[in-house]
Image (tube, grey):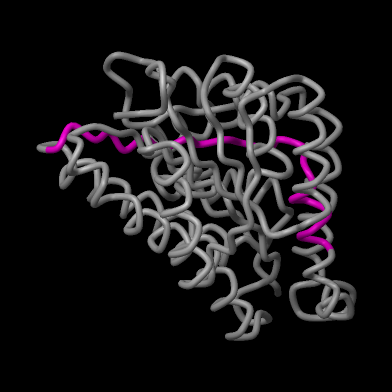
Amino acid sequence: MSAAGGTQTVLITGATDGLGKAAALLLAERGYRVFAAGRSADKRAQLDALAKEKHLLLETMQMDVCDDASVQTAIPSIYQKAGALDVLINNAGFVQVGAVEDLRLEDWRRQFETNFFGVIRVTQAVLPQMRERRKGRILMMSSVSGFVTPPTQGAYSASKHAIEAVSNALRHELYPFGIHTILIQPGYIMTSIQSTAMDLAQPYEEKFKTGPYAGIYASYLGNATSTRAQSKTTPEDCARVMLKAIEAARPKARYGVTPLATFAKWSKRLLTDSAADLMIRRRYGIARER
């Protein structure tokens, strides 16, 4: 059974910042027992202090989704403390900015190791217990970039496209066991993920300015600035969508977050590839060289 008194237990990866932190706090405030996983000791300490101040049933834990031993240590500790895991939120991830030609293979590998293989690693670790109990929910943090790929976002979008695919497979494979797999698809929400993306892009700073894709990089940075200024959706808004997906009697396969996600979804359905390509190229000022 779940934790004492029927309290549902939730594990959130990448939970000490941004969308994961907002979800951890909201769910704990709603009475869930939350295990908030992250790598940064400082951020875990800050979240633990906040949880203690608010008297929340929230405990942080060290877990690196890219490390087998770390995951295999963390998951059994949850079972020892709570008895079972009801909800997994695969949230850990980052954005690698760069043109496909510019990015090194090590950048691609690092992007997929966290955003995709990390998700597989944690999901495989919790599935045997969920199957045995014939219940559970797995929330996969995808993105608008999981179904629309702008320039300079090839690596990140590829990792999120992969998440969309594996989620579709899991939704069918886990249906006989009463386990729901649910995609969360945010658009632009201001968190530290954007500043981290710029830090990771520093090795390419010169190419941003003088390389063959300099114009596209400039458009990307300009679009990011304008989108940031216009964005009104908060991490707390996204957390409320996650809560809705967890508590829905019959959850949808996908939940969009932000007006951009809704617009992108309908554009993908209604526009031809040529029309969608034209819209993206105009937005980024991309024209054929003469």
179 is within the stretch colored magenta: yes
Residue located at (49% from left, 28% from top): 256
Residue located at (66% from left, 37% from top): 19
Q: Residue 45, percent across and down? A: 80, 46
Q: Is residue 259 visible?
A: no
231 is within the stretch colored magenta: no
Apparent side of residue 204 relative to residue 245 in the rendered image (left or right): right
Judge whether 59 appears above or below 6 on screen.
Answer: below
Q: Residue 105, percent across and down? A: 58, 85
> Which quadrant is home to the C terminus?
bottom right
Residue in front for this viewpoint, 137 or 44: 44
**Residue ranking furthest to the left:** 176
Residue in front for this viewpoint, 25 or 198: 25
Apparent side of residue 151 relative to residue 174 in the rendered image (left or right): right
> Which quadrant is home to the N terminus?
top left
Apparent side of residue 263 relative to residue 165 in the rendered image (left or right): right
Judge whether 81 appears above or below 250 on screen.
Answer: below
Apparent side of residue 40 relative to residue 2 in the rendered image (left or right): right
- How many numbered circles are shown? 0
Residue located at (47% from left, 52% from top): 77
Q: Residue 228, percent across and down? A: 82, 37
Judge whether 212 appears above or below 78 on screen.
Answer: below
Q: Which residues are magenta?
A: 177-198
Residue located at (43% from left, 41% from top): 88
Q: Residue 201, percent across and down? A: 79, 70
